[in-house]
Structures are given as structure tokens and as C-alpha cells.
Amino acid sequence: MIQDAPPQLPEVVVTGARLPPAAGEAAFSVIRRDEEDLRGQQRLDEALASVPAVSLFRRTSSLSANPTTQGISLRAIAPSGAGRTLVTLDGVPLNDPFGGWVIWSQVPTESLSGLDIVRGSGAGPYGAGALTGVIQLRERDDGSVLNASLSERGGARLGASGAANLGPARLVASGLYETSDGYVPIRGPDAGAADTPLDLGVRAAALRADIPLGEAALSLRASAFEEDRGSGLAGARATASGSALSATAALPPSADRPGWRLQAWRRESDLTNSSVAVSADRASTTPANDQYETPATGWGANAALRRVVVSGVARLEWELGADARFSEGETRERFRFMSGAFTRDRIAGGETSVAGVYGEGSWTSGAWLVAGGLRYDAWSNSEGRRLERDLATGLPTLDETDPDRSGQVVSARLAARRDIGSGQALRLAAYSGFRPATLNELHRPFRVGNDLTEANAGLEPERLTGVEAGWSWTGDRAELTATAFWTSVEDAIVNVTVGTGPATFPRAGFVPAGGVLRQRMNAGTIEATGIEVDGRIDLSDAFSLRAALSATDARVDGGAMAPQLTGLRPAQAPIWSAVAGADWRPLDRLTLAADLRWESRRFEDDLNSRVLDPAATVDLRADWTLSPSATLWLAADNLFDAEVEVSETATGVAGFGPPRTLSLGVRLTR
């Protein structure tokens, strides 16, 4: 008797535990980048810079930026070192628990399958920190990639990511090693013996296990990173390190049951940052501050319940959720360098928390999509303290305990989108959001060269309201989008100039000649009006063009707190920025790409007295396919060696971005 063959079981595909993108996101301004878009960039923040007005606090990328200036902002409303954008990896915040910035080297581009940039304040499921928007990163679920390269000035980089099945589970691992001798940011006759290269060393690794739980999935992830970099001045260096753990369980919704997500995470970080005072002739430096430790811990949890109901031609999707985030940390540093030694010690820090509940929903029927969300959050700042001691006697010279503070914020968003035929659509959105001050802004004073900035434990959360209208068109071989927006940021946290050196100030101490003293303040309101245009066209199967433009007119109303700022532009906020590019495949095995990035002038300081000139750079890249799984590539960044001003001191000495850099690499995929 012949036995019947056993029935063939469907293949089980294990993926990371996450909910699918919400249908309502399509009603807002969303830019999607997939793995193909990311493969041409070695650093994640540089890939994000392909969108106009998306940048770190200064024009430098994470190749040379100090960790404390790696916060990212969407739209040129009011860039900040802490960043005004929430960055998540599969739902887990990547923003530093102490400073709010993002150490971009912890996520190599090879580890991602794509990302979404949601512009406009992110109420609903995003909550605190998503003031100008959200960047949602998606870690890869399958495939493997290895990217190895060598660059000028001692640059070497190895980034890899891969997935493998282990019984019913799947493991996804990624790693990054990078080193560079760096470049000297001060050029020409202004440079002196005090100016040194911005060298860099990076290591990062992550491991994720995806475990099926019936129709649900559980993802357990662990990661760690460390980077060590020069700050461009003799005796000045910065290091950043950290680790993170997360656990996520999720069940996607279906027609007959709701979906859900449960997530918990913990992040630890540390930062060292030594700063120096520079002599007038830039021949030497003197130690000014030694931030030798900045231990910080952040942890949180979130939960969501999502339901999709389809009735006829209408589709209703809703989500209810709650989330909470907690941070604690302090800066430990030595300062007041006299007679060859530091004479004072400072410990300053505290705790912050924010917790909220939200409801989000969308309705789709025919050509219409309507989406909205409502949030309620409670925030608190507690245990704030600043203790300064004389190192010789051990006696306190300053001992301040900050009063605990708390508050509540209601935020919302509402949007509608309508398809009007011929591939066109119109949309309208309104939103509000908030960002509490970070521990860094509340408690840590800092120094850059001869400029000092004081902390402010009394900072209130920033609050943003905005409206925007958009039009889009999608054709067979082309697409075009346009958006006009208006936003207002109330109680904007700004570094306000309060004095100039040489002089001695209460709490801050001595400011040398050529330096200024600033203090973080809720300096009134920043209003911004802008337009964004983005398009691409495939002229043939082998040749395509793309371009995008952003224009943002942002102005400060300093009110009674900082009237001297009224009518001025926020620091580091250009009016115009544009990108353009072309991709050409002249041969089946050869692909050529060219990218142009330009932006108008911006100001280094709050008083608009230090002008950074307009800047334009051109990048070229050639990829030669060796086999279906191997590609050899050659890249020239800043091809014409443009001098891109990224900083300027009170005495007019300009710092510049990287010179022309050639890189050669190989990319292997499976």
C-alpha cells in the first residue's frame, strides 16, 4: 500500500516584532527611503541629508561632528545640538538619555532595510521629542551585506549585517568598525599649532533574535557602541559609548482580530569631553574643562492595541496606546585651570520623565483618507542638583538644589488626503507637539573654544503648533510633491548671548578675550513659513534625475526674555537648501551617480553676527558589478574641494567641513 505524501506546510517567515505602518501616515508628509537608497551612503546621517533641510546642528556629518552636536532636526525651523526630532529603531528611541542627540555610528546603514521621515510634529503614537518630526528606522529581517572601504587620510571602514535561521528562530547581527586620521578644520593662514585633525575611531555591534509565538513574534535585541574622536584642538577630545537592550512582542492585526505591541527598553550611555582655551595667535591651548564622565540611563515601555475594520468600500483603523520614558544622569567634570592644574570639580544632573496615553485613527473610503490623533502627557524634572567644590580643600563653592517641576501637555494632529484623479492628490494637516528639555540642557554648562554656555534648570518644554497643505502627482515614470507649511515654536530653547569676554561672570566664571557667554533660555517664539518641493523622473530605463528644494523663513520673537533676538533668524537655520542628483547606467555592469547639495548662508550665533557663507558640494560615485553578489565602488565626496564653513569664532576664525575625499570599496550581498 502506497502511503500518501504528507501535506506541504506553508513556509514560516520569521520577521522582527513590529506593527505595520499605520494607514493614516499617508495623510501626512512622509518620505520613504528603502535599502537601495541607503546603499550609496556610509553614514546614516549623510543618507538623511539627501532630504533638504534635514541636517545635524551644524553642517558637519557624524564623520567629524562632536557627539554633543549630533542632534538632528527636520525643516530649518530651529536646529539644536539636542535635536528636535525623535529617532526610533523599530519603535525604540535612539536619542541619548542625557543629551537628546543621536550617536549615528551605533546604526550602520548596512543594518537597515529602510526608513521613514515623518515631517511635522508627531503627536499620536510618537509623543515627547517629536517636535519637528520623527525618523523611523527599520532593521533588516533577512539577507546579508558586507561593505569594506578605504579612504584618504587614513580612512578605513567595515560595515556588515546578516541574518540566519536557528531552528524556528532567526538571528540578525550587525557590526561596524571605522577609523580615520581626519582633517584639520581650520585652513590657511588662520591655522596654527593649536589646530589638530578631527581623527575618529568607531566600533559598534548589535544582535537581534526573532522568535515566533504562534501568529505573534518576539524580538530580543542587544547593542553596544563606542567612538573616540579628536575635537580639532590640541588637548581636546571626546568619547561616547553606550549599550541598549530591548524586548518587543507584536501581533499584526487581521480582519478577525486586533493586533498589539508590547515593548520595553533600557539604554545606558557615557560621554567624555575635554575642552581648551585657544591663544590669540592659535599657537597653543590651555585646558579649560575636563568632562571626564557623564553616566546616564534611560528606560521605558510602550503598549499599543490596533484594530482594522473593513465594511464595503470603507476601512477604519484605530490604535490606542500608552508609553513612558525615564532618564537619569549627571555630568562629572573638572574646571578652572590655574597654575598648571584644575582647581574645581563639578557634579550636575537630575532625573526626567514623561508618560502619556493616546488614541489614533484613520478612515479610508474611495478617494478620501482622514486621520487624526490625540495625546495626553505628563512630564517631570526632579532630583536636580549642581555641586561645585574646591579640589584643594574639598569644600563646596556652589551647592544648588533645583526644585522639582512637573506639568501636563495635550497634543493632537488631524489630516485629510483626497485623490483627485490623474495620479494627483491633495492633503491638509494640522498638528501640535512638545519637547521637554534634556538633562544636558537643564544641568550641564559647556565650552567650545573660548565660548561658554550656561545651563538652566528652569527650562520649560518647547511646544509647537503647525499647519501644512500638500499636492502630489505620480505618473508612470515620474513623481512630484509640493508642501507649504507654517509652524510656531513657543518657549523655544535657545542659547542666548548674555556677555562677552574678557570678564568674570557669576556661576560661569572667567570668559577669555574673544569669547562670549551664553545661557540656555526659553527665548520667546520662533515662527517659520516654508515650502518643500521634491521630484524625480526616469528618462529611460538607464537614466533618472531627482531634485528637491526647501525654503524656510524662520524668525525669532524674543519677547521680554530676549528682546535683542526679535526679528533675527535662529542659529544654524538656512533659508534655502536644495539637492539634485542623477543616476546613469551606461553599461549593464556600470552605474554612475552624481549628487549636488547647496544651501544658503546661515548664522553661527543667536545674534546673527557670525555669518557662514553659502555652500555647495558635489559627490560622485561609480559602481561596477563584479558578480550578482559583489560590487566594486569608487566615490569622490566634495569633488571640487569646496570650502564649506561650519563654524566661526568671535574673532572671525572659520572652521570648515571635510575636503575632497576619495574612497574605494567592495560590497558583498547574499
Image: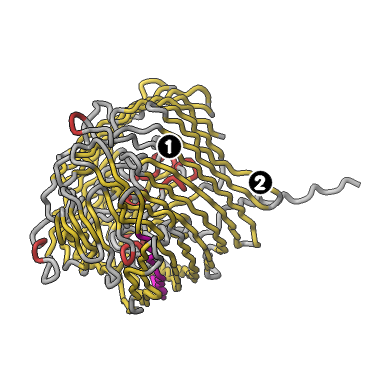
Q: Crowdedness of circle 1 by 10 Å Cα count: few (<14), some, many (20+)? A: some
Q: Under tag 1, what secondary structure?
A: loop
Of the pair 630 and 475, the residue shown nearer to us = 630
The foreground one among 315 and 490 is: 490
Image coordinates for residue 479, horizontal then vertical, percent: 28, 43
Residue 556 vs residue 131: left or right? left
The percent coordinates of residue 448 (x first, y second) are 27, 49
Which residue shows up at 18% across the image and 66% down it? 523
Residue tagged by mark 1? 39
Region of the chain picked out in magenta, as a range: 344-360
The quarter of the displayed image where residue 40 is located: top left
Instruction: Name the spot of residue 618 as percent of width and height, x first.
Output: 26, 31
Which sits earlier in the primary sequence, circle 1 or circle 2?
Answer: 1
Question: What residue is at 35 percent from the left and 29 percent from the top?
Answer: 541
Q: Quadrant of the C terminus?
A: top right
Determine which residue is flagged by label 2: 165
Q: Main secondary structure of the magenta part?
A: strand
Q: Nearer the viewer, residue 206 or 305?
A: 206
Among all residues in the image, which is located at the extreme right? 1
